[in-house]
Amino acid sequence: LLAIDRNRFCMSNSQCIVIGAGLIGLSAACILAKSGLSVVVLEKDLASLSALDEQAEPRPLSLNHASFTVLKSLGLEHYLADFFTPIKHVHVSMQANFGAITFSNKQLLVPSLGYVVSYSHLAHALYKGALDAGVKFVNIQQIDSIKSASQQVEVSAKTTAGIGNWTASVCIAADGQNSFCRQHLGLQAHETTAQYTSDVFRLQLETEHLNR
């Protein structure tokens, strides 16, 4: 850390800067850090990650086998072992159409077709994995500017201690749908609306479901 002045308090050099600690940002930080790169993550709400709050975001997520394989390769399986629910049977049908498709993990000779886990548990596991891999996290209030020069990018952000500056070779903007970074840099984005919608139900069973 290099002291600059009262308003611009530090200059930190890393190989990668990740803006946003959602699932995408945390996954990118884990993968890069596991590859041996130095990574810093800038995030507005670190409190919800550091202290697991199951009620903050109980939304269930369905992970396919490929996603689970990535998590396993990052060494995160043990963080989630008690919270995964395996998907062993799938039924697909469409209203007003004849027929349906059903298949199971036994038919495909795999341990599971996928897994269901809550957003909160997955985000917390990725956060713990990133810490284990040496990722540095900084709680910010907002991004001030993003500038690129030569082969480096400089990010300035407001924090409770003043304005901090970080430089790196790579900057990943993972700050969500209404991305400040995208708007600030003038990057074009194309949004498409799906023709179909889906309803997701979170059921709390009184007895064990026996994976059926």
Image (cartoon, rainbow, N blue to C red):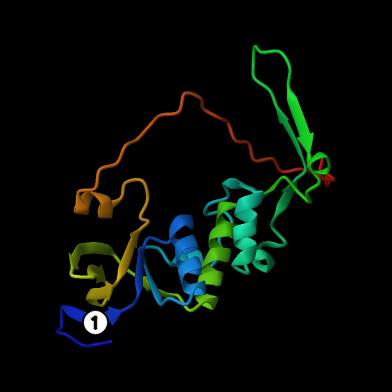
Q: Quadrant of the C terminus?
A: top right
Question: In this view of the protein, which residue sits in the foreground, 70 or 87?
Answer: 70
Q: Quadrant of residue 81?
A: bottom right
Q: Position of residue 166 (x, y in %)?
A: 26, 74
Residue 29 in the figure: left or right of residue 60 = left
Three-letter code for the amino acid on which mark 1 is drawn = Cys
Seen at 34% across and 35% down, the residue is 191
Q: Quadrant of the N terminus?
A: bottom left
Q: Quadrant of residue 71?
A: bottom right
Q: Position of residue 93 (x, y in %)?
A: 68, 23
Local secondary structure at mark 1: strand
Q: Quadrant of residue 103?
A: top right
Residue at the spot of label 1: 10
Most extreme residue toward the front, as rendered? Answer: 150
Q: Position of residue 136 (x, y in %)?
A: 41, 76
Question: In this view of the protein, which residue sits in the foreground, 89 or 170?
Answer: 170
Residue 127 in the figure: left or right of residue 142 = right
Q: Position of residue 131 (x, y in %)?
A: 51, 75
Seen at 15% across and 78% down, the residue is 7
Seen at 29% across and 65% down, the residue is 141
User: Compared with residue 73, is residue 116 higher up or lower down, i.e. above or below?
Assistant: above
Residue 85 in the figure: left or right of residue 166 = right
User: Compared with residue 151, is residue 184 higher up or lower down, i.e. above or below?
Assistant: above
User: Compared with residue 34, is residue 90 higher up or lower down, i.e. above or below?
Assistant: above
